[in-house]
Image: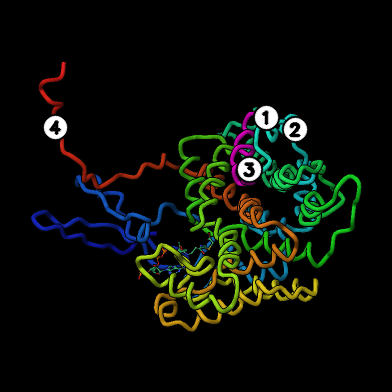
């Protein structure tokens, strides 16, 4: 909706009038689309001041620590919903009724297995390959298996691809783990719920099928909910950009997985645990906090800070509570956890972190829970990717369901102007 106007005054030129768009909530947005007709562009590296799209899926108020999916607060979803219901909500815009939920869950269950041939892709990887490297390759390779649903202009095909991706991600994620362990890959079990089935495929073997702890399955489900979507973050924007060229959904999600892998984004949960290992003990915290504050040192406190949340990360709040529950259930007294809590306390009271609004983010606590559940550090980002797949695919579907243009940013060119090759060349 545009009822206000902004005026851009550029020295020596006539003022340019720009519409100001108003969302349902959140700040007004200056629509600069007409600027290109004046021969000028905006410059905003890192998209600090740029809305790349219009969306109805997720809303974040970083100052107030608010995160809403289709209007519902993340705290309520984490407490009273479950992951598959949240998936339905993100994909379809409304919570399902009982019948819709049962049909959705059943459809997801019908797609949990992967083609047997997909297993052979794993053999091409070294056993010590990072699971995210395998995920990028294997998820991208799904495009070679589902030619029946790759017409991105067909809403039914988009729907089927979305279901396949949500259903198969836990299977593929667990396969990467089993491959690294040299253990047989486990088939999914459709009598279990989404989180239980994932833990079954991760930790059971054909020789020994142990029951899945309901507390751990619940915690896993919460981790999935808390990572399900986060509006236009780096990986989601990557998926949208890849999708805007008409690429198939499996290729787009593989691009999202690649973007998520970086330590500034989804790779942070793994980096938190590696950092805690490096710090080693409580006595070393001060030294590492000083390193994080030193502008000549690239070291950052992993799990602290966020581009959007400048007060607190609402996901971190829920995660901290889940963390306490899981550790109590498992009776874990982990010195690394004690170290993490001490680090949190010191950093939160340090003027450097306070002035810059650097609070623990979701990844600070999720790594600790995942470790307690018995998931190896290298799998942490894989679990983030599994959970975020629904967010990526919801944004991809939203973009394709309306008018869209190929994403093609411009640049401020600061290289050589045109010049000629030396005259002595033939
Ligand atoms: N440790 C030390 N200093 C930091 C940290 C940190 N973790 N994060 C930001 N700063 C400083 C930064 O050096 C800068 O200082 P100055 O103003 O003196 O130059 C100031 O705080 C502002 O930081 P920024 O880098 O401009 O902020 P950004 O919005 O570009 O980056 C971030 C956000 C998440 C990439 C960054 O805070 C970071 O690298 N954090 C550690 C990695 C991490 O935990 N990432 C997970 C994010 S949550 C999960 C997800 O959504 O993917």
* Callout 2: SS: loop
Label 3 or label 4, whichever comes before in sequence order: 3
Q: Is residue 155 magenta?
A: no
Front label number (1 vs 3)? 3
Residues under numbered marks 4 and 1 in contact, where contact means CB atoms less than 8 Å apart:
no
* Callout 4: SS: loop
* Callout 3: SS: loop
Front label number (4 vs 2)? 4
- Of 98 and 284, nearer the camera is 284
Label 1 or label 3, whichever comes before in sequence order: 3
Where's residue 281, x and y in %? 60, 74
**Figure check: 20 above or below 336:** above
Q: Which residues are magenta?
A: 130-146
How packed mark 4 is, by other alpha carbons closer than 10 Å (few <14, some 14-19, many 20 or more), is: few
Query: How far, Cα to Cα, is label 1 from label 3?
Result: 23 Å
Residue drawn 51% across and 69% down? 304
Residue drawn 69% across and 72% down? 323
Q: Mark 2 = which residue?
A: 115
Front label number (4 vs 1)? 4
Query: How far, Cα to Cα, is label 4 from label 2?
Result: 55 Å
Label 4 or label 2, whichever comes before in sequence order: 2
Q: Mark 4 = which residue?
A: 419
Q: Mark 3 = which residue?
A: 129
Q: Residue 145 got which mark?
A: 1
- Considering the image in quadrants, where does the N terminus appear? bottom left
Residue that extends furthest to the left in the rendered view of this protein: 12
Label 2 or label 3, whichever comes before in sequence order: 2
Residue drawn 75% across and 58% down? 97
Residue that extends furthest to the top in the rendered view of this protein: 426
Q: Is residue 135 magenta?
A: yes
Q: Is residue 359 left or right of residue 164?
A: left
* Callout 1: SS: loop
């Amino acid at each position: 909706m545009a009822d206000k106007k902004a005026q851009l005054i550029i020295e020596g030129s006539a003022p340019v009038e720009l519409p100001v768009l108003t969302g349902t909530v959140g700040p007004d947005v200056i629509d600069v689309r007409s600027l290109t007709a004046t021969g000028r562009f905006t410059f905003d590296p890192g998209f600090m001041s740029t809305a790349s799209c219009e969306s109805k899926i997720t809303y974040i108020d970083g100052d107030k620590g608010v995160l809403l999916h289709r209007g519902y607060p993340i705290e309520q979803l984490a407490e009273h919903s479950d992951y598959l219901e949240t998936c339905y909500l993100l994909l379809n815009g409304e919570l399902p009724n009982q019948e819709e939920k049962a049909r959705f869950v059943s459809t997801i269950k019908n797609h949990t297995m992967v083609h047997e041939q997909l297993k052979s892709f794993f053999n091409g990887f070294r056993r010590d390959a990072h699971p995210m490297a395998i995920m990028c390759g294997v998820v991208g390779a799904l495009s070679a298996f589902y030619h029946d649903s790759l017409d991105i202009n067909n809403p039914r095909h988009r729907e089927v691809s979305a279901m396949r991706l949500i259903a198969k991600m836990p299977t593929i994620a667990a396969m990467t783990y089993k491959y690294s362990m040299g253990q047989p890959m486990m088939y999914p079990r459709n009598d279990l719920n989404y989180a239980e089935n994932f833990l079954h495929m991760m930790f059971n073997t054909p020789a020994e099928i142990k029951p899945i702890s309901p507390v751990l399955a619940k915690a896993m489900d919460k981790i999935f909910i808390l990572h399900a979507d986060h509006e236009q973050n780096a990986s989601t924007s990557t998926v949208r950009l890849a999708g805007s060229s008409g690429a198939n959904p499996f290729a787009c999600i593989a691009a999202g997985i690649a973007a998520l892998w970086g330590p500034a984004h989804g790779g942070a949960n793994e980096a938190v645990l590696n950092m805690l290992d490096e710090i080693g003990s409580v006595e070393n915290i001060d030294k590492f906090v000083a390193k994080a504050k030193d502008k000549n040192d690239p070291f950052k406190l992993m799990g602290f800070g966020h581009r959007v949340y400048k007060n607190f990360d609402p996901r971190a709040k829920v995660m901290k509570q889940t963390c306490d529950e899981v550790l109590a259930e498992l009776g874990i007294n982990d010195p690394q956890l004690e170290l993490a809590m001490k680090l949190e306390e010191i950093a939160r009271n340090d003027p450097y972190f306070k002035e810059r609004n650097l609070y623990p983010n979701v990844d600070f606590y999720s790594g600790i829970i995942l470790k307690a559940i018995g998931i190896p550090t290298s799998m942490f980002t894989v679990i983030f990717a599994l959970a975020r797949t629904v967010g990526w695919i919801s944004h991809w579907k939203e973009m394709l369901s309306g008018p869209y243009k190929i994403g093609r940013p411009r640049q401020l060119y600061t290289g050589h102007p045109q010049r000629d090759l030396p005259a002595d060349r033939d």
